[in-house]
C-alpha cells in the first residue's frame, strides 16, 4: 500500500522561508519513509475564503488513498477539521494532524462565521483513523485557549500541548513526526 501525506498550509505567503513552508520542509526532509508527500497551495492564501478553501481541499481529498495522513498547519488545520466534520471521505485516511490551528469562535478575535464549525455537523471524525491536535503554550499567534476548545469539541483526539515552540512549530516538528511515524508503522 502506498504511504502518502497531504499537508495543508496555513494562510499567508507560502514561498520559501515564509508561512508554513519551513514546517512543511522539515516534515518532508524528516519523513523519508513516505512514497508521496504533497503540499498544494490553497486558493488566495493571503485573503482566505472558507468556500474557496473548502472547494480546494475537496479537489485534493478526491485523490487520497486509504491510509493517507492529513496534516494541516494553522488555518490549514482548522479548515481540514471543519471539512472532515461536514463531509464523508471516499477512503478512510490514516489520521489527521492539526498543528497550531485556530478554533474559530473561541474568542472575539477569532470569530469569523464561515470558518466556525457548524452546530449541526457531527463532532466525530469517523473517517480519520487517528486525530492529533498540537498547540504551543507560547504560540504568539493563536492563543492556547483554542487548544482547550478543541479538547472539548473532539474528546477522542490526542492532544499535544508543547512548551517553547512558536506558532510556526518548526522547533516542535519532531513531536509531530514521532506520531506520524507511529501511525505509518502501524498501518504498514
Image (cartoon, helix red, strand yellow):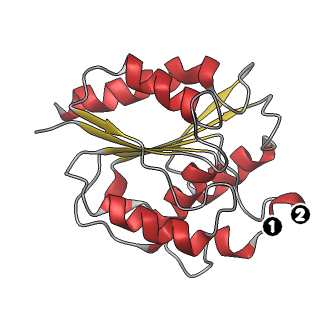
Mark 2 is surrounded, within 10 Å at the Cα level, by few (under 14), some (14 to 19) or many (20 or more) other residues, namely few
Residue nearest the viewer, comparing 132 with 91: 91
Classify the position of the C terminus by image quarter.
top left
Classify the position of the N terminus by image quarter.
top left
Number of numbered tags placed on the structure image: 2
Q: Is residue 61 above or below residue 35?
A: below
Q: For this view, does 168 lie left or right of residue 73?
A: right
Q: Is residue 47 above or below residue 31?
A: below
Residue at 43% over, 62% down: 57
Q: Secondary structure at mark 1?
A: loop
Judging by the rendered image, the residue that carries numbered circle 1 is 111
Judging by the rendered image, the residue that carries numbered circle 2 is 108
Q: Is residue 186 above or below residue 77?
A: above
Residue lying at the far bottom of the rendered structure: 120
Mark 1 is surrounded, within 10 Å at the Cα level, by few (under 14), some (14 to 19) or many (20 or more) other residues, namely some
Picture coordinates of residue 46 (x, y %)? 68, 55
Picture coordinates of residue 59 (x, y %)? 35, 65
Residue 76 in sight from this viewpoint = yes
Q: For this view, does 166 lie left or right of residue 56?
A: right
C-beta proximity under 8 Å, tags 1 and 2? yes
Residue lying at the far left of the rendered structure: 1
Residue nearest the viewer, comparing 12 with 169: 12
Residue lying at the far front of the rendered structure: 15
Residue at 73% over, 75% down: 113
Q: Which quadrant of the structure image shows residue 4?
A: top left
Residue at 23% over, 66% down: 90
Q: Which mark is residue 56?
A: none
Picture coordinates of residue 111 (x, y %)? 80, 67
Residue at 61% over, 47% down: 10
Q: Which quadrant of the structure image shows residue 141?
A: top right
Amino acid at each position: 500500500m502506498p504511504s502518502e501525506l497531504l499537508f495543508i498550509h496555513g494562510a499567508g505567503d507560502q514561498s520559501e522561508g515564509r508561512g508554513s513552508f519551513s514546517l512543511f520542509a522539515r516534515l518532508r526532509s524528516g519523513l523519508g519513509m513516505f512514497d508521496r508527500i504533497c503540499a498544494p497551495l490553497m486558493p488566495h492564501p493571503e485573503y482566505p475564503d472558507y468556500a474557496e478553501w473548502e472547494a480546494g481541499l475537496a479537489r485534493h481529498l478526491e485523490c487520497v488513498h486509504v491510509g493517507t495522513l492529513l496534516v494541516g498547519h494553522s488555518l490549514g488545520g482548522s479548515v481540514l477539521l471543519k471539512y472532515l466534520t461536514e463531509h464523508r471521505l471516499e477512503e478512510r485516511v490514516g489520521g489527521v494532524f492539526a498543528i497550531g490551528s485556530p478554533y474559530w469562535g473561541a474568542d472575539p478575535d477569532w470569530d469569523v462565521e464561515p470558518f466556525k464549525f457548524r452546530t449541526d455537523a457531527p463532532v466525530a471524525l469517523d473517517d480519520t483513523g487517528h486525530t492529533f491536535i498540537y498547540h504551543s503554550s507560547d504560540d504568539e499567534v493563536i492563543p492556547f485557549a483554542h487548544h482547550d476548545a478543541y479538547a472539548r469539541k473532539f474528546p477522542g483526539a490526542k492532544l499535544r500541548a508543547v512548551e517553547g515552540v512558536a506558532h510556526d512549530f518548526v522547533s516542535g516538528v519532531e513531536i509531530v513526526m514521532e506520531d506520524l511515524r507511529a501511525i505509518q508503522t502501524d498501518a504498514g
